[in-house]
Image: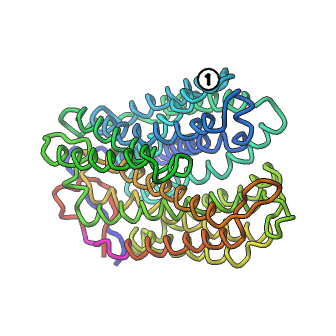
Amino acid sequence: MGESVIKAPPGDTTGELPGAGSKGIVGVLALAGIIAAVMQTLVVPLLGQLPQLLHTSASNASWVVTATLLAGAVATPVAGRFGDLYGKRRMLLISTVPLIAGSVLCAVADSVVPMIVGRGLQGMGMGILPLGISALRDLLPAERLGPSIAMVSASLGIGSALGLPVAAVVAQHANWHILFWGAGALSLLIAILIYVVVPDVPVVATGRFDGVGAVGLGVGLICLLLGISKGATWGWDSGSIVGLLVAAVAVLVLWAWWELRTVDPMVDLRVARRPRVLLTNASSAVLGFGMYSASLIVPQLLVLPKITGYGLGQSMLAMGLWMAPGGIIMMAVSPLGAKLSAARGPKVTLVAGALVLAAGYASSAVIMGSTWGLLVAVCICNSGVALAYGAMPALIMSAVPLSETAAANSFNTLMRSIGASFSAAIIGVVLAQLSTTLGGHSIPTENGFRVGLFIGCGVALAAAAIAAFIPVRNVGTSKRSTSSAAAVAA
């Protein structure tokens, strides 16, 4: 069956904005998501030069990336819960503050410590995307919600794809500090636009902020993600990594125990364990793994020298340009995904997205011998990502109360980030094990890349299988789901 729409409850102001105003809101929130995503790819062209630029070792320089990952993972669910309790517009504006401050700090940094701090501050602004998606449920009429969710959700992939070539151009032809001055200016621009364009709405959630739950989740995530991200460097059997992973399990178990017993939890696990939410989050984590695998493999294939027999010998700038069309494809496919969700429901769109992603991986393993072949594969993969990105928030918001929209979306975003972290670790191990030596440097073999691509394909198929079991029901009679624009059905 197609979707139906939940009627707005008494007093709900959703959908009262005129069409022009709602279009402006969507544009601003999509731009905010793109800018937040650009922060993630900003340092990619600099990775090889960071030790020299910051006068430090390679291991210390790697914290420039790790700090953003950890700060984003911890801040995203906290920002979501604050958004539910104190207003999404307010938290959107607050989230731009560390983006601006972190960008300025990185722009004036010439050593590793301020650079790490600045990148950590930039990571704290990553809650903008789930907050923006959640705000759409409060601000838009029902008929515009699906396409708008799809567009804002796709902004993450669009920003990552388009930000890379822009950053490469600046890094190659200008002082690298300009990258961060530009990031600061963009962050300031989006803060102004949010203030001017995005209206405030009454807060629905009640209760207090769960400080104990926030600390517990933060500590557990830091232990988990630090253990995953540093496993290859420190050694998977080292005492530090084993200790971090054991601590992560112990802390997260205690955190779950606390959340199930506290009156105002940081994450409502009673809602999160509903089959619709649980399976959507599970498929999101697996899809996060699958989505990130291509980002690890394709750029390496493009920049490895042709003397390897399978590398394509592209410069960093050329690599970014070959990857950029994938972002444009996401922008084009997102509205199609919204139409599919409107006709058949977001569950069908999520399954379709996972299957298209799997097809992209399968094709890339066959046509990886040319730049045009990889371009086609990237476009197929990103088409699947665009479909999936738009469907996941729709599924989540159709199953949670209006008072928990931001927290639930932030937790879903976190699950994707955890999946991506596992992808980096596992694909990294595969490429390291299936490697050879060239010019004194260890590089992955062609077989290693193929294995990595087939792993991505298999994981995408697993995500489709999980998504296929998501229960679909008409939630129009649900007492807990009070949105005027949530998706339903079958």
Which type of secondary structure does the marked residue at label 1 adopt? helix
Residue 269 is left or right of residue 342, and the answer is: left
Q: Quadrant of the N terminus?
A: bottom left
Q: Residue at x 33, y 34 (%)?
A: 87
Please tell me whether residue 477 belongs to the stretch shown in magenta: no
As drawn, which residue projects farthest toward the right? Answer: 307
Q: Give whichever of 452, 243 is nearer the camera.
A: 243
Mark 1, Cα crowd under 10 Å, few <14 / some 14-19 / many 20+, is: many
In magenta, the rendered stretch is 467-474
Q: Give whichever of 162, 371 is nearer the camera.
A: 371
- The secondary structure that dominates the magenta segment is loop
Percent coordinates x, y for residue 301 in the rendering: 74, 62
Q: Residue at x 19, y 54 (%)?
A: 270
Relative vertical location of residue 282 with respect to residue 358 in this rendering, above or below: above
**In the rendered image, which quarter is residue 244 located in?**
top left
Please, which colouring scheme is shown? rainbow
Relative vertical location of residue 428 with respect to residue 124 in this rendering, above or below: below
As drawn, which residue projects farthest toward the top? Answer: 108
Percent coordinates x, y for residue 263 in the rendering: 13, 41
Q: In this figure, what is the number of numbered marks? A: 1
Q: Residue at x 52, y 65 (%)?
A: 290
Q: Quadrant of the C terminus?
A: bottom left
Amino acid of disc 1 = Val
Percent coordinates x, y for residue 156 in the rendering: 55, 50
Q: Give whichever of 197, 368 is nearer the camera.
A: 368
Q: Which residue is mark 1?
A: 104
Q: Residue at x 49, y 34 (%)?
A: 197
Q: Give whichever of 37, 390 is nearer the camera.
A: 37
Residue 396 is left or right of residue 352, and the answer is: left
Percent coordinates x, y for residue 205 in the rendering: 23, 39
**In the rendered image, which quarter is residue 94 located in?**
top left
Residue 169 is left or right of residue 215, and the answer is: right
